Image (spheres, rainbow, N blue to C red):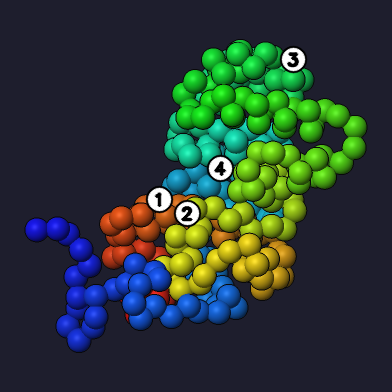
Amino acid sequence: MKDGPVAQPGRAPPSHGGGPGFKSRPVHLISQLMESLEAFKEQLREHKWLPSPGESLSWWAGFADPFHIAVTAVLVRMNRWEQAEKVFEELSRRGLSSPEAIARASQEELEEAIRGVIFRRAKARHLKVLANAFLSPGSIEEKIRVAPIGSETREAILLFALNQPLFPLSRQAKRVLSRYGIRVGRREAREIEEALGRDLYKLKLLHASLTVIARLYCKPKRPMCGGCPLSQSCARLL
């Protein structure tokens, strides 16, 4: 017998976001979501996210150097955080954790150093792009905004390393928000930024919380709704 959503007495089985009867909720309800995430904040520390004032350059696992934040944002794409951290430690062991060192390194040397992550050839190229952006004259922000490193990675770097008020539209964020009842595309992401007053702390808390909730509870195939901090207001369960 295949597992699936269990109906509660007097209630239809919950929808997987977008199913029959699903009603999208307006983006302005992000304020209700943020109340739940603020209460969830302390649990983020258990997963190495360290909520801090918006201007603070604090990223996962305590990374606070802008270039290190950028490097780990590239490494973690389509990988687990623990693996990205391990690979960054290997880069550091080889003396490849600065923009100068990465700019000097060959493509092959970088690929070998980051062999613990998937898509290492593309990621080695992306690390080169980042190193050049940090070293060459001109605005780092402007160069990152047009860097060919993927929109999610780009926006995460801009938010956490350069304190630009953006909402990184990750796969995890889309999954959690769609089940919660907020449809999110590029236009809605910009609306969320406005709804949060382009507040850096709130945007960082939102990204960190959705990342952890997606990993622990809002899994792609079998969501574990019982312990989710959003269960009391999630459209999937209403």
Question: Which mark, residue 215?
Answer: 1
Q: Distance between the residues labelled 4 and 3?
A: 27 Å
Q: Is residue 126 above or below residue 97?
A: below
Query: Which is more toward the observer, 96 or 186?
Result: 186
The residue carrying mark 3 is 104
Is the residue under label 1 in contact with that under label 2 (CB below 8 Å)? yes
Residue designated by label 2: 172
Q: Is mark 4 on a helix, strand or loop?
A: helix
Q: Which amino acid does label 3 sit on?
A: Arg
Q: Which of marks 4 and 1 is in front?
A: 1
In the picture, measured across the screen, residue 146 lies left or right of residue 84, that is right
Q: What residue type is labelled 2?
A: Gln
Tell me, yes or no, if residue 193 can be seen here: no
Q: Are marks 3 and 2 in contact (CB under 8 Å)?
A: no
Query: Residue at left 66%, top 31%?
Result: 126
Which class describes the residues within 10 Å of circle 2: few (<14), some (14-19), or many (20+)? some
